[in-house]
Image: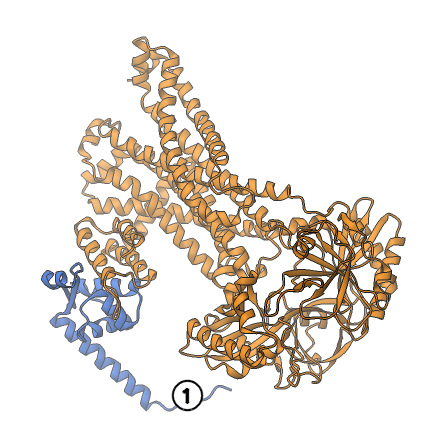
Chain colours: A blue, B orange
Amino acid sequence: MAAVRMTQVTALVLRAVAAGRRHGFDIMDACGLPSGTVYPALRRLEKSGLLRSGWEDPEKAREEGRPRRRTYVLTGSGRAALANAEAKLSEVRDLLRDLPPAPREA
Amino acid sequence: MTTMARLWLRIVSVLVPGADREEWLEEWEAELAAGGPGMDPGNGPRSATDAWGALADAWTLRTEGWTMEGMLRDVRTALKGLARKPFFTALAGVTLALGIGANTAIFSVVDAVLINPLPYPHSDRLLSVNQTAPGLHLPVVPHSEAMYLHYLKGFKTLSSFAVFQQDNVNLEREGDPERVASAQVTQEFFDVMGVHPFLGRGFARGEDRKGAEPVAVLGYGLWQKSFGADRTVVGRTVRMDGVERLVVGVMPKGFAFPAKTELWIPLPIDAQNPQVGSLSYIGIGRMAPGQTVQSVQREMQGLLYSFADAHPDDLSRAVMKQAGLAAHVEPLKDLYVSDIRQALWVLMGTVGFVLLIACANVANLFLVRAEARQREQALRTALGATRRDMVRYYLTESVTLALGGGVLGLALAWAGVRGLLAMAPVALPRAGEVGIDGSVLVFTAAISVLSGLLFGLFPVFGYARRDLSGALKEGGRASTSGRERHRARSTLVVVQVGLALVLLVGSGLMVRSFVAMRDVDLGFATRDRLSFHVSLPSAEYPDAASVGAFERGLLQRLRAIPGVEAAAMTTALPLEEYKSATPMEPADHPVAQGKLGPLVNVRQVSPEYFKTMGITLLEGRGLTADDEAPGVRSVVISEKAARTFWPNDASVVGRYVEEQGSKETFEVVGVARDIRFEKIAEEPGALLYYPVAPTGDSVPQPARSLSVVLKVGAAPLGFVSAAREALRAVDPRLPMVEPRTMAGIVRDAMASTSFTALLLGIAAGIALLLGTVGIYGVISYMVSRRTQEIGVRMALGAPRGSVLRHVVRQGMVLVGVGLGVGLVGAWGVSRVLSSLLYGVSATDPATYALTAAVLALVALTASWIPARRAARVDPVEALRSE
């Protein structure tokens, strides 16, 4: 399984899926990113095993009068990667907080 | 989900690897159909842009597993392959360069003029804030002083609101006086635009009120050109229109709003005693955060009602209703580009068609080539290349070629844009900013890659799928599945002919509009007339007496120039932009109270105007110097005005008219023929001619912005320097502005039509050329493949004539189908053209028939040449070559 580079986009997408957004367009809305950014990220994440995709219950879709939608969920390694990314992020945040303030530009 | 979105997904899905394609489509269609939160399901796509990402998605899936080294290797192989066939490569490259270059050139104009016409901070928040009066055929009704003050106090949905008025001022400096495009603006103007002077300051509160100290802000270009980029100019005074103004600031480079403005001076708003009825200030505003165009519109409508209620005498609800007067808020960019927008989008679509035709041609070349390469392909497969490898290789080759064509096209576009702008209508906003910049480069790269994929996919689907072991055995000349290959090529010919016909019909319609406009009887003469502008500063020409003296003095000197047959002046020549519609009424039967009188356009003209302009007087006389004498109130009206006021009377000289609500009556001394004065394509409206400088202190004011016109023996532009001398002798401080011929004015008025006609013509010409090459290529190829068969037929006794007919018929069947498709397509597309047309219907049968006939004839020639070659086949030779 190919490793995926953790970027702002992939972290956002993972976060959105972890928060329970299951469909592509819902993830776009949650991240505020266009489809041309979110979908390639989803494909890469799925390929590297951080996400797993499936299809929603067709019964439910039929009740709502629309075609069935693809669903995305985090895998075990996805959860680990997200935790890892969030830990790194908060490390950076701490680092930034502890730095002396930048001198004002003249 | 819209049909367009569905179609888009289908097209994009060809990129997705076959195994995933079905699920991929299902996912995208379901997402688009699902809609967003708070939206009805089934109403998507939520925004058109949501579907665009499908391309990026499909590309990700297609390129999965492509590595950098692999791609570089493919590019190298592709380049080598292309270099081995220089003729093929050059032909395909030039074809693509034409298509891509045309698209790049037009896109660079569209980008500067339509997509990004206001390069200012957060320009999406900039609004045009005015009224509209459909009842009076006025799309935009500006503000009066009182309205401005009312809105300024009331607006909560705008973070700033300003009004302006375009103007020109005479800059008086040592040497020749200079005429500068200026704008009078209120204090908030620079806040609205979000741009402030980089040197000095903008206007301070109160500087835009009557009686304030006169100040000015310079534009960057003017500062560079006329002040030598001297920073100390801020704080000095400069004489403009006879007034010493303190320069308080210089605007940064690139700021020119409204278009071409180089100097900003404050509007002297009279806050104590504001004018209510004179509507001449254009309103602009910056939306406050969280507001929408609709919310601003709603607030403004409320403010307009409260304004009307506060001024019932000037603006009753009845008049408002009759005029359809309503608040009108729209994005500011829509206000400035509306005229040219349609034409530019049509051109953009046109060059898109040209690119499609070019792609079809290149696809055809690739098909032919792929056939010749079956052996090579079979060999690669035998050596272990997978289908995916082959697809990748083919696409790399076509995209590499397309990018090469794109680079060449960029060079063509760079040259083409220069030519384009030289021909462009004068009204093209921001023409100076058009050029090849970042977004144009991205666009060129994108269409290059897309066209590479488009024509590259043809051979991929035609050949990569096939069982190739047969090809290897057969030795290159596979006759199997010839039908399939032929079908692909035939489809391309049909598409090409169809697209070419659409473009030919479009350009035919534009040419007919151009001819119809040229043949319009304008009502005035255009030959051998020279015109120029001059504008009199009110500080030095304060009253009718001084303006009248200037009028007489200049005309006398101009008439004394040898070769000048007549001279006159007016507030605006026909077809010059000038709006002055006033409700008027005949004095003997005024319009009922609370109703609006007929709108009449007003001009002020000097003696001999009608003679100089060649406008026939149908009754009475023209205006003379005596009509400017004290106590005399004379006017000439146009036929249309006469019919409007007195529909049943043959003679109207000696009757009286008045501006509605005014007690001042004017005697009609003459009736002039109708002329086309606003647009060539518009039926003449009602006109009324006052003298230039009537004595008396009410309507009309003496005219200070004047267009002078001379009737000369020949070669009008040869009189410019003599006319300038005459002006200098009367007042050396006044610059002569924009000398041009009457014929030039008419040409400019037609520029939008002739520009569109010319570019459509060029595009149609390219389409015809490419289409012809396509047909010729397909038929000759067919002939060359079937030489043996033809040889056999002839050996069996088929006469040459029948062979010729047979081949030509095959070509013409394709052309016929293409023409049918094209006629339907043209009929569908012509609707978007209809607003650009004049004097010809968008579905004019003659144009359709003629262009189809021309195309058929050209196609006939293109298939006849290879057919003749077929008919000359020597049966013995043909059979021996087996």
Q: Quadrant of residue B184?
A: bottom right
Which amino acid lies under the numbered mark 1 shown in the image of this protein?
A: Ala
* Residue at disc 1, secondary structure: loop
Q: Quadrant of residue B189?
A: bottom right
The x, y position of residue B805, in whole percent, is 38, 18
- Give the camera-side residue of B130 and B51: B130
Q: Which residue is mark 1?
A: A102
Question: How many neighbours does mark 1 have within 10 angstroms: few (below 14), some (14-19), or many (20 or more)?
Answer: few
Chain assignment, label 1? A
Identify which residue is drawn at 69% across, 57% down: B687
The x, y position of residue B851, in whole percent, is 48, 34
Give the side of residue B470 with respect to residue B425, left or right: left
The x, y position of residue B441, in whole percent, is 45, 57
Give the side of residue B305 with respect to residue B863, left or right: right
- Give the camera-side residue of A103 and B214: B214
Q: Is residue B529 above or below residue B131?
A: above
Give the side of residue B380 with respect to residue B702, left or right: left
The x, y position of residue B760, in whole percent, is 51, 44
